[in-house]
Amino acid sequence: MPVTYVIRFDIRSGKRDRFMTLLNDVLDAMRHEPMFHQAVLHADPENENHMMLYETWEDHQDVLDVQLQRPYRAAWHANLDDLLAGPRVISIWHPIRSDRSAQSRS
């Protein structure tokens, strides 16, 4: 059953560029994983250091056992304490419906 993770980040002042570089590396790599569905990164319009990521995968157990262990995630995980002002806030959801515009948009 697909699973969506909603992850909120509070990035330390002056660390946003490094955060984005490391996260972009992970996102670029994980899009090629066969169990990956999608990911969308959002920035708070009032504070660019507050971000929210949601990512959907085919299987929660695969994420725990396989995806979190991928080598391309090592630098990301190793740097989180330095990059973030506090722990990530992670919630887990099961998608039941997905809608997109009937018009073609990026």
Image (tube, grey):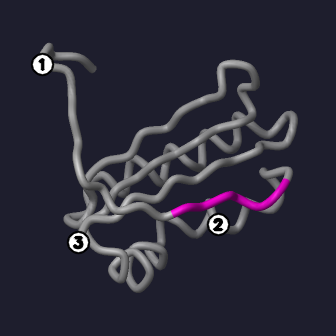
Q: Nearer the viewer, residue 97 or 51?
A: 97
Q: Quadrant of residue 59?
A: bottom left
Residue name at image x 20 percent, y 21 percent: 101
What residue is disc 2 on? 77
Task: Determine contact: label 2, label 3, CB under 8 Å.
Answer: no
Q: Which quadrant of the rendered structure holds the N terminus?
A: bottom left
Q: Residues within 10 Å of mark 2 (few under 14, many from 20)?
A: few
Does the magenta segment cover residue 90? yes
Q: Nearer the viewer, residue 45 or 71?
A: 45
**Left or right of residue 20: residue 31:** left
Element type at mark 3: loop
Element type at mark 1: loop
Residue name at image x 60 percent, y 61 percent: 90
Task: Determine contact: label 1, label 2, CB under 8 Å.
Answer: no
Question: In this picture, which residue range is highlighted in magenta?
Answer: 86-91
Q: Position of residue 20 (x, y in %)?
A: 61, 39
Q: Quadrant of residue 96?
A: bottom left
Residue name at image x 34 percent, y 56 percent: 56
The type of residue carrying mark 1 is: Ala
Q: Position of residue 104 (x, y in %)?
A: 15, 16
What residue is disc 1 on? 102
Q: Marks 1/2: CA distance?
A: 38 Å
**Left or right of residue 46: residue 65:** left
What residue is disc 3 on? 1
Q: Nearer the viewer, residue 7 or 19?
A: 7
Closer to the eye: label 2 or 3: 3
Residue name at image x 73 percent, y 20 percent: 46
Q: Marks 2/3: CA distance?
A: 26 Å
Q: Position of residue 89 (x, y in %)?
A: 67, 58
Q: Position of residue 48 (x, y in %)?
A: 71, 26
